[in-house]
Amino acid sequence: MRNVAIIVQTINGVVRMEHLRENIKPIEQPSSLPNIGRLGIQSKSFVAIIGTIIVVLLAGEGIAALIYKQIDFADSYTTYRNPYYRRGWVEYTRPLPKPPNTRRIIILSNSQGFLEEVLDGSLTYAAQLEQLLNEQLPDTPTEVLNWSISGARSPELVLLAARAGAHDPDLVLLVNYLGNFSERTREISFYISDANRLGYMPEVRQYLPEAFIELHQINDPLAWLQANTYLGRLTNYLELPRYKSWSWDYTDRVLRQLDNSRHSNRWNDRADEQLRFIYQALSNSTGAAPPPLMIVHMPLNEASFRPNAWEKLQTFIPGVEAVFEGVDHVSIYDAHDLFTPERFWGWAHIRPDAHREFAEWLLPRVLDSLGESSSMTTSSLAS
Amino acid sequence: MIFNSPEFGIFALIVFPVYAVLRGKPLRFWLVVMSYIFYGWANPWYILLLLGSTVLDFNIGKRMSRTDDARRRKMLLAMSLIGNLGALGIFKYSGFVIRSINDIAATIGVAFPVEPPDILLPIGISFYTFQTLSYTIDIYRGQLEPTDSFSAFALYVAFFPQLVAGPIERATHLLHQLEEKQPTTTDDLITGITRVLWGLTKKIVFADYLGIYVATVYDGGASNLDYLLATYAFAFQIYLDFSGYSDIAIGLARIMGIDLRENFLWPYLSRNISEFWQRWHISLSTWLRDYLYIPLGGSRKGSARTAANVVIVMFLGGLWHGADLKFAIWGLWLGLALGVYHIYALIFKKKFNLDDSLRWRDVIGIFITLQTVMISWVFFRADSTTRAFNILENFVTRDLRNWTRLRALNEEEALLVVVLMVITFGLHIFHRLQQGRAFLKWRHPVLVGAFWGGLILFMFMFHAPTGERFIYFQF
């Protein structure tokens, strides 16, 4: 056999081309087999190669499916927050049938709701709220699903809102602040949590506003494959988390943006658009009778912000009110100054005891949105 | 346009089918047009620069061949040098020079009211400038006959597989292949595609993953242990990134039946620094040798002059990489190491052959060479010269705790970095030991398909979450 093209040698860059040229002569093709143009390969060989590649890929997909189905993924019903940190949003938010006479509340929030500083997720205000609701209304079990993404940006919240409908929620809580609404528009792959995979899943994508899909360029074929194949999902599961290189970069960017005097005291125009997207995605996914949407300005640490940034942050509530003016089932609450600076761990993360207190603050408002009356007051709970 | 982008996938799907049906001049014309589209994708104006360089050197080459008048030939060569290096100087070095003058003026308290120009560096300018210069210099030296075919020369300057980051080709090697294009053989096609897939794997799996952790350390605060790990990781990242690019370039050309020069031959198994430069970025190091080192006198004028020549060439080689003091120091450090080695080799009459088998006693040489190169990578990767010196200073002055704990990376990340480096170094050793021997002779379509399918699967599953540009695109 005269053909000594050596695949692995070639890989290594081992082959001196002079050596190859000496040893490789053009192959004389049998005339009965047509070549593909000037690319010197027989059609039969070409078909065999392509066929084998397809078989290998399908076999890989089959093996990945077998492995993937053996993995016991955590879900938002049995855990207090996404155990995969910023990953795993496809698995964590997969819907389970709603038991009869049960209420569901979904919380869309950021790192404050995630409470990354402690390992025990039952200390999050979402878990505390679930406990309080079940104590308050023992005849109507309530499931509070904590969909808080550390480092969340508004496009990720839109995707989660589109996912929410499949869970048949009775209430959706959006607990955020202006910093989650970036003024820059980026393609969806930019956002660090893999909530962006939801955008490629047909069951979620169908509820996304067209303008949102276009704005964030949710049209990458490779990302589609990763979201819709077992190989892609398994890859995501196997990927090592990167803890160190995201959060504070993000914070710095937000603070720089807030400090920029050109933007001070001005409502972020992109926030208007993104809030509408969240609302549209939620309404689309929940059908004719959308659940109440409760928007809460999250507690913030005043000591962490410069005066003009602090002032700008307070435009969040008026801005939200302007967007949802005249919309019945949207209620808006302001908790930005609920806690003094010593109740915070850093610039915006409240401590576990403050989580409890925040849950108590939320309780009567949640009951009100659910059409229930609270038998306990916040102060009595606190005492 | 970059190789690891969806746009390039579409580009390739257009280029190759048309390539398969064209011949002769139309084929060259097609490849020139597509190469220009490839180059001008980000900024079409830079095509004018490429075209200008092509027209200049094509005409100078022709005129030079028509005259025996040494003075006129020299003048024509000077025109080519001024034209090409002038463009390179304006686009790449003018800002650096003005900033340096400003700094010096500020130091001595003199006002220098010139602002550095805000010019975006045209991608690949350092590569194609050297390539087109070698054409006129070879004609001047009488080593090459100029081509009569403008389309062949335009393709030689702009050939898209190697336009942006090499290998830097020589007209003596590439031009005649473009003039008399041979059909692609089955071997060309299989070898070419395999090499493209392997280059992509090196880039998007290994190099990009290492890049994430290198950036985590170098762009933030870190301990000595972090920096040590990240510097080694960067050494492998830049090797995998650049040799991956070269593999893709060589593979793409091979699919078209064109043979490009090798650019890397397991450099981290070099037994001395001189051997390293025969195995690392070979197309640049041989260019510098042929067009700078030898004209300076090479090794013909005594040991002191040889060492000085080496230092000068490496210093300029460093500046070729970027208009920044850190690259100059990078080149200077390696130049000094080369100079010292040359003197050592002369004194102890040390000679080596590139093809010699490795022996156990070579481990010491390999280790010393690796550490010498490692120090140079600190300058290459750090944001600035000051930062590079700080990192090196910390290596010496910081207490023991800084060597025993990780700060920027967590243990999982550090373990992954080590595993990736061990795999890369293992492949290095394996390939080096296999030098010149075929260990897989099969070419059965099913086996080829299985191998390609496996590589595609591997890339799909294990590609790094963030796609990075090739490092050498900035030069």
Image (spheres, grey):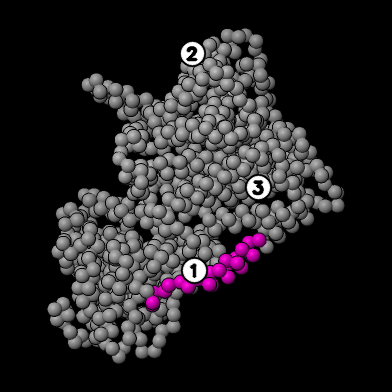
Q: Nearer the viewer, residue B95 or A344?
A: A344
Instruction: Same chain for labels 1 and 3? Say yes or no.
Output: no
Q: Which residue is mark 2?
A: B304
Name the residue type under label 2: Ala
Q: Nearer the viewer, residue B124 or A61?
A: A61
Q: Nearer the viewer, residue A23 or A148?
A: A23
Q: Which mark is residue B194?
A: 3
Q: Which mark is residue A309?
A: none
Q: Nearer the viewer, residue A161 or B451?
A: B451
Mark 2 belongs to chain: B
Which residues make up the magenta segment? A56-78
Secondary structure at numbered mark 2: helix
Classify residue B338 as left or right of residue A84.
right
x, y percent for residue B13? 63, 50
- Contact between marks 1 and 3 (CB within 8 A): the answer is no
Q: Which residue is mark 1?
A: A201
Give the distance between the C-alpha atoms of the residues marked 1 and 2, in whole angstroms: 68 Å
Q: Is residue B352 magenta?
A: no
Give the distance between the C-alpha atoms of the residues marked 2 and 3, in whole angstroms: 46 Å
| Looking at the image, residue A356 lies above or below residue B378 | below
Mark 3 belongs to chain: B
Say whether residue B182 is visible.
Answer: yes
Residue at x 49% of width, y 61% of height = A238
What's the magenta bit mostly, secondary-structure-wise?
A: helix
